[in-house]
Amino acid sequence: MSTFIGNIEARLDDKGRIFIPAAYRKILAEEDSKRIVMRRDTDNACLIFYPESVWNEKVSTLRNALDEWDPEDQLLLMQFMSDAEFLETDAQGRILLQRKNLETIGAQQDVVFVGMLDRFAIWNPSTFAEKKMDQHDLAERIRIKLRSKN
């Protein structure tokens, strides 16, 4: 499986449509994803996009961790799923984003696509710039995470 990497600036049209970057469309085609799933991120002001097969794996993992008879687990599942929607690309490789989702991330016209291995995100460029760590902090956090896994 190819991976979504890099960050790519893009511009929404007046209707809220945006071209998925060519490199990302190629990965989606390799995955044979007719649809993608968009979900508002739970922790950051961004939208996350999954190839349908990856989404199905993530949901299966979540479902297996939850007790279907526990009311709190049911609410957790409902809320998680209610923030998601299926999207299809048009013939030109664009997706249509609802205004409510764009407002959630503070996007006007410019956005940035950010690769996340098996999925990708769309951010307001200034919000993404604010959230990014400087190179030293990034390197240090990676070292800490890798040490804790050994």
Image: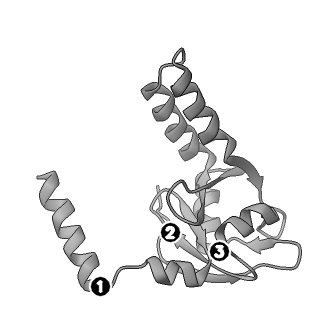
Q: CA distance from mark 2 to mark 1?
A: 18 Å
Seen at 19% across and 75% down, the residue is 140
Mark 1 or 3 closer to N-term? 3
User: How many dots with numbers?
Assistant: 3
Marks 2 and 3 close (CB-CB < 8 Å):
no
Q: Is residue 77 above or below residue 82?
A: above
SS label for mark 1: helix
Q: Circle 2 sits on which residue?
A: 115
Q: Nearer the viewer, residue 9 or 126?
A: 126
Q: Circle 3 sits on which residue?
A: 22
Q: Which callout, 2 or 1, points to the residue nearer the camera?
A: 1
Amino acid, disc 1: Gln
Amino acid, disc 2: Gly
Indicate the quadrant where residue 142 lies: bottom left
Residue 65 location, x and y as percent? 42, 28
Crowding around mark 2 (Cα neighbors within 10 Å: few <14, some 14 to 19, many 20+) is some
Mark 2 or 3 closer to N-term? 3
